[in-house]
Image (spheres, helix red, strand yellow):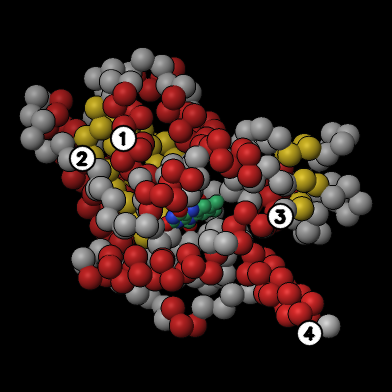
Amino acid sequence: MKVLMICFSQSGNTRKVAEYIQEGIQQRASSCEIVDLSDVDTGVLSQYDLVGLGCPTFYYREPFNVREFMEGLPDLKGRSWFVFCSHGSVMGETLISMAECLEQQGIVVIGSHHTYADGTIPFYPYPTVTTGHPDDQELQEARDFGKEIAECAQAVAGGDTGRIAKPASLTDDFVPAEIEMLSREFMDQVFRVLSVNEDTCIECGECMDACPVDGIDVEAAPRRIQDPCVYCWYCAKVCPTGSIVTDWTAFDQMAPDNYAKYIKALNAAEARGEFRWLMDPATLKFDDPLHKQLERRVNEGAKETTV
Ligand SMILES: Cc1cc2nc3c(=O)[nH]c(=O)nc-3n(C[C@H](O)[C@H](O)[C@H](O)COP(=O)(O)O)c2cc1C
């Protein structure tokens, strides 16, 4: 059995999980390669007996570049695929949404896997609530999943569909409303606020390298951040001179509240036996750009009222 795993991984968590899944698959299959999403030749996908597609959760779903990749696939009707993701506190609809998108094209999604991983949202505090994940136990679970999915694919190829499992469903009440809000349309309208400060940009190209969709050109005049932005904010994170200008206003209302929700969701996941705390949430330091902005506004507001 020949297996291919396709992976989008911006900061390495999903890639690490993919390598453990690969180890498990290799115990049951003749070959299992991992390829980056940006290097996939979609013309050869039908040559594989099983394809896995993995990515981080961005905004409770798969990132927009992953969705666009799935929507642009050639005809692969009847082929066996599996989906996997790494995520911080709340995976939301990631796996369900990926499976639905593939199934709409006739691909048979035979299984799925998700792993808690270090949160890497550039505008949130670090270390964060899931720092330290995936730990050894979660990596072993990924390896076990690899074995299981390979066995499942072999069974499906032999006509036995009994082991096909649907992706996990949502368990967190607060998620659906936020998912609706964070649609591509919303992001395009509200978050189209990234720009390059021409005065301080040193054209080092760090942002261009970090952009997963080649959406930045600092050599152009004027320097550009353009479609297709996936709103990962990594350009702002890596810029050594702070020249990627962002406005966190759209997140303002949600941010402090979010952390209470994440902790609640993780406590619920712990109660279900799906999560283990590796840090004490009381030690979180809110010294990231978004929270500093909030603090500044609060302080400025206080000054205004005292003057
Ligand atoms: C822009 C952005 C949005 C994110 N949104 C979520 C989210 O909605 N839920 C969640 O649990 N984690 C979220 N995360 C955390 C990532 O899913 C997590 O850190 C993931 O393991 C990163 O994978 P990677 O290292 O393979 O890129 C987000 C991260 C980024 C950068």
The Cα–Cα distance between marks 3 and 1, rounded to whole angstroms, is: 34 Å
Secondary structure found at label 4: helix
Does residue 49 appear left or right of residue 69 in this picture? left
Mark 3 sits on what residue?
247
Q: Are marks 2 and 1 in contact (CB under 8 Å)?
A: yes
Label placed on residue 99:
1
The Cα–Cα distance between marks 2 and 1, rounded to whole angstroms, is: 8 Å
Secondary structure found at label 2: loop
Instruction: Characterize the local packing of mark 3: few (<14), some (14-19) or many (20 or more) Cα atoms within 10 angstroms.
Output: some
**Image height check: is 256 above or below 68?**
below
Q: Earlier in the sequence, mark 3 or mark 1?
A: 1
- Queried on whether the Cβ of the residue with tag 4 lies below 8 angstroms from ligand 1, the answer reads no
Instruction: Characterize the local packing of mark 2: few (<14), some (14-19) or many (20 or more) Cα atoms within 10 angstroms.
Output: few
Name the residue type under label 4: Thr
Q: Nearer the viewer, residue 199 or 2?
A: 199
Q: Earlier in the sequence, mark 3 or mark 4?
A: 3
Q: Nearer the viewer, mark 2 or mark 3?
A: 3
Name the residue type under label 3: Asp
Q: Earlier in the sequence, mark 4 or mark 1?
A: 1
Q: Are marks 3 and 1 in contact (CB under 8 Å)?
A: no
Residue at 42% across / 21% down in the picture?
A: 73
Q: Nearer the viewer, mark 3 or mark 1?
A: 3
Name the residue type under label 1: Ala
Name the quadrant containing residue 75: top left
Quadrant of image for the C terminus: bottom right
Mark 4 sits on what residue?
306
Q: Nearer the viewer, residue 18 or 88?
A: 88
Can you give x and y, in whole percent of width and height, for residue 292 in the image?
A: 68, 71
